[in-house]
Image (cartoon, rainbow, N blue to C red):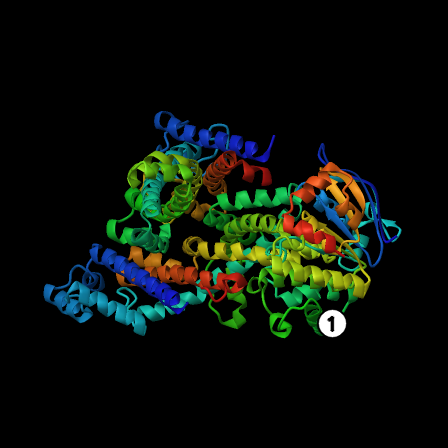
Amino acid sequence: MMLEIRDLRVTFGNRQVLHGIDLSLERGRTLGVVGESGSGKSVMALAVMGLLPGTAQATGRIGFDGRDILTMPERDLCRLRGNRIGMIFQEPMTALNPAMRIGAQIAEGLILHQSMSRHDARKRALDLMQMVRIARATERIDSFPHELSGGQRQRVGIAMALAMKPDLLIADEPTTALDVTVQARILDILDDLVSDLGIALMLISHDPGVIARIADNTLVMYRGTMIEHGPTERILRSPGHDYTRSLLDAMPRRVRETLGDAP
Amino acid sequence: MSRWHISLILGGVITVLVAGAALVSRIWTPADPTAMDIMARLQAPNAAHWFGTDQIGRDVLSIIMAGAWTSLGIAVVATAIGGALGTLLGVTAAARGGRTERLVMSLNGVLFAFPPILSAILLGALLGPGAVTAITAIGCFMVPVFARISRAAAIQNWARDYIAAARMAGKSDARITAEHVLPNIMPQIIVQLAIQTGLAILSEAGLSFLGMGVSPPTPSWGRMLSESQTFLGSAPHLVLAPGLAIAITVLGLNLLGDGLRDLTDPRRGQRA
Amino acid sequence: MIPTRLRRLAAALLMLLVTSLVIFLAIEAAPGDPAEIMLGTSAQADTLAALRSQLGLDRPLMVRYAAWLGGVVTGDLGQSYTYGVPVAGLIAERMLVTLPLTLMATVLAVVVSVPLGVMAAARPGRAGDGLASVFAQMGIAVPNFWIGLLLILGFALKLRWFPTGGFPGWGDAGIGAIRSLVLPAIALAIPQAAVLTRVTRAAVLDIASEDFVRTARAKGLSRRRALWRHVVPNALLPVVTMLGLQIPFLISGAVLVENVFNLPGIGTLAYQALSQRDLIVVQNVVLLFAVIVLVVNAGTDALYARLDPRLRGRA
């Protein structure tokens, strides 16, 4: 197993936000994590990145290729982040540095982790931009984030997360801030990446519709606890828990009907 | 105890002490601040003269106390006038908008181009040196500062729902400003009053240092420093005392302002 | 886009015009007859009248104002009443002291305050932060001319490392000139550095909580590297703005510090001209300072727009 989380608990001060999470994820598979906002999804993602704020306390184990992220020294974590674990954030509007050209932001990790020359890193950044299907990448590489649309920025975010061909990609609500049509395209890109590059994807969303499209397995979270965990199809077709059912019922009927066709 | 508590208490204590010394100096000082004693000139601090004596034998502590009255007086009057005018301009600009607002902002720009020393040089040519010149020069520079702050704060208030309701009820702009906007922006204005009084003390000291403040024999900290230059090598206590008086007063007012700001805006207090 | 640019330019020019009119009228209203100052009070009435008409003082007010503005544009600022030399040349000569002094002070202030502010914000609440905030509070409270006096006391009178004052001119490879500017520049820089330290600290704290900093950390950047590569460049914007807003204080400070160190700069020129009632010099120097403040403020806005790509092309 590449990622194996055992009994992960996180507390901020005296408020516990994660009450024992267990999950595992293999290469080439997609795990969907679904739950309403405040259910602890993003805290879990940050814990896997080793980026919990200093006020948080985490216990349990986050095994990544046999090593525990929770006890890893900061130096090793820096080598892991970006390089072997990539992350895509929810807000494409604020997740990019406004004062830095996007090409440089994509290339930054390559220069850092693979000691690439500026020139080579830029060439690689261009490839990545084409891979995530940013049109006219040669022109856009020197754009600033504010010159791009939300969808394009999210693609830049994905290109950044993929730059070092990480083994694990964590996508925290990658499509929430985007138009519906753009959403579908971004999900397609992510799905292709899992099958083409053989990476493991942890897709976090409050929207079961998004999860249904591409996740092999699904984890349902509610107020920091796991409610259900299993193959996506089973969970969505015959939810074993009232909360999951209410989550599904909250979706528009038309979307629910298409779930039957979900892969 | 959090940081703003310390600022507020320390700043408040210093300010009260300085203001107290200024008030007490009106009725009592250890010695007559104008009484010369050539025999006892340029004495270092001792039991009879805690801060020593100056070049004509006057008691430095007494001059410092009397100087507090001058410095604080000019600074407070200048800040009060500048603050009142500036705030009035700011809230008017916010209430009126459009042409009035542009006019006020341009006027601000022009006034801002005249730092106190510059307008004092200009006014000095016109009126000669003295308290009026100092107060006008310092007050003029305060106007754009207060206008900018009160305008920004007032605009925020105008956007609120309860003001829309007051408008709907048919109240005039002036009445809404007086009844709703001004009371709401007062905390920010008070904070600025404290901080700007500190800056005014510095400006007044600078003007007196250049001989553009109050004329002798009225004691002033800035002129004491100017006179001390001649005795820099032989009587360093003459440099230290007035400088420390200025620095401590300004520090107190700044701390008070910072403390008040964090008190009225708790979000900032937590982060600071 | 172009109309807003033009409108801003027009507004700036109008402000300059109003400023110059204020200065002109104040000097006009000031007591003192230039001809009398030049010739002395014992001069004959007709000699005075002749000089007045030679100086153009008998022309109507608005004509003289227009003539002055015309002169300002062409670089002819008239003759000093007391020195008997062109005012423009006098100002240029004194600028050779004031300009290096203020530049040295600004560079010094930035070099000290930015690292100090960043350090304070990197570990808020720790010893470094406390030290920086003590420096900031003290630096804002002490008058720069007093710092100047203390520096003279310590480094010129006691240690004799630097001269107590005066200016030897830019000959001799400028070494003597630089030496005599060091202490004044430090005195001028300390209050500036204090203000900038505060601004830097607040800006860095503000930017450090932005989403894109987390993105940078997720790329594998260490805390330190993310701070210098992503936080600091964005935090410099408010620092630059503050530098612009501080110009009036820098100018006031220069007048005072030049006085303390007996430097023949613009500040001393203005001050001496005032005490000798050389009003034409006062008028032009005050205009120069006001123009500098207005231009620097406009320039800060433009620089701000260049530094913040989001504003680029909109300014």
* In this picture, residue A10 sits left or right of residue C9: right
* Amino acid carrying mark 1 in the image: Ser
Q: Position of residue A189 (x, y in %)?
A: 71, 63
Label 1 marks a residue whose chain is A
Q: Is residue A177 visible?
A: yes
Q: Quadrant of residue C43?
A: bottom left
Q: Position of residue A36 (x, y in %)?
A: 67, 42
Q: Quadrant of the C terminus of chain A?
A: bottom right
Residue in the foreground of this view, choosing between B34 and A102: A102
> Is disc 1 surrounded by few (<14), some (14 to 19) or many (20+) residues within 10 Å?
few
Residue at image position (51%, 49%) is C195
| Residue matched to label 1 | A117
**Number of numbered tags placed on the structure image:** 1
Q: Position of residue C262 (x, y in %)?
A: 43, 57
Residue at image position (26%, 65%) is C81
Residue in the foreground of this view, choosing between C52 and C102: C102
Q: Position of residue A86 (x, y in %)?
A: 75, 57
Please say if B212 is above or below C234.
above
* In this picture, residue C267 sits left or right of residue C283: right
* In this picture, residue A75 sits left or right of residue B116: right
Residue at image position (31%, 71%) is C73
